[in-house]
Image (cartoon, helix red, strand yellow):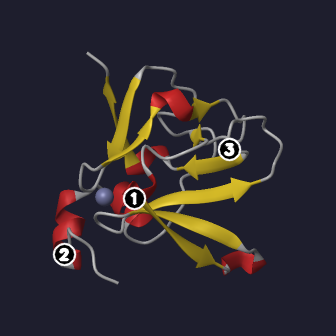
């Protein structure tokens, strides 16, 4: 798989904090309820912390009480990439940044949250940077 932004591993390590690297480049998950954007309601755009691509809008962020920032849709379908993830004995769909391949989180469907798409993009705060609207 190739991405518009590709860097040697050593460069990512240099650019990102160890925590960011672990999630974005190694598919880790930050602990629930500790991420800086879990309960954020600020109006703005969330972009990829690794490459700056704009990924999610505060307009689709909703209160899922799951412990991670949750969105019902990406900013545009071509901003993210979906991969089947069968780790931990579960069938999940991984969500990555389409520009750099950075791991963002997972998307779940049909949980009954009552959002327009019935989807929950469960995203690690540490994979995102919020740019508040001016
Ligand atoms: Zn990215």
Q: Is residue 38 visible?
A: no
Q: Name the mark on residue 78.
A: 1
- Graded by Cα atoms within 10 Å as few (under 14), some (14 to 19) or many (20 or more), the crowding at tag 1 reads few
Percent coordinates x, y for residue 18 in the rendering: 33, 60
Q: Could you give the CA–CA distance between mark 3 and mark 2, rounded to whole angstroms?
A: 38 Å
Residue at left 39%, top 59%?
78
Label 2: which secondary element:
helix
Q: Is residue 79 visible?
A: yes
Between residue 4 and residue 9, name the one nearer to us. Answer: 4
Q: Nearer the viewer, mark 2 or mark 1?
A: 1
Give whichever of discs 1 and 3 has the lower sequence position.
1
Placement of 125 over or under 100, stated as above or below: above
Placement of 94 over or under 58, stated as above or below: below
Picture quarter with the N terminus: bottom left
Residue at left 80%, top 52%?
110
Contact, mark 2 vs mark 1 (Cβ under 8 Å): no
Percent coordinates x, y for residue 133 in the rendering: 31, 20
Give whichever of discs 3 and 2 has the lower sequence position.
2
Q: Could you give the CA–CA distance between mark 1 and mark 3, rounded to whole angstroms?
A: 17 Å
Residue indicated by mark 3: 117
Count of marks placed on residues: 3
Placement of 40 over or under 13, stated as above or below: above
Picture quarter with the C terminus: top left
Percent coordinates x, y for residue 41 in the rendering: 51, 21
Asked whether, in this view, residue 49 is left or right of residue 115, the answer is left
Q: Name the mark on residue 10.
A: 2
Residue at left 55%, top 33%?
60
Asked whether, in this view, residue 83 is left or right of residue 23, the answer is right
Label 3: which secondary element:
loop
């Amino acid at each position: 798989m190739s991405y518009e932004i590709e860097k040697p591993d050593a460069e990512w390590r240099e650019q990102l904090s160890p925590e960011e690297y672990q999630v974005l480049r190694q598919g880790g998950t930050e602990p629930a309820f500790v991420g800086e954007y879990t309960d954020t309601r600020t109006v703005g755009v969330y972009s990829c912390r690794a490459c700056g691509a704009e990924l999610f809008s505060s307009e689709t962020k909703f209160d899922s009480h799951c412990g991670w920032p949750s969105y019902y849709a990406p900013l545009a379908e071509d901003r993210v990439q979906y991969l089947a993830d069968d780790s931990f004995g579960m069938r999940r769909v991984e969500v990555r940044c389409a520009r750099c391949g950075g791991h963002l989180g997972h998307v779940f469907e049909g949980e009954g949250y009552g959002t327009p798409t019935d989807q929950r993009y469960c995203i690690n705060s540490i994979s995102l940077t919020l740019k508040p609207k001016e």
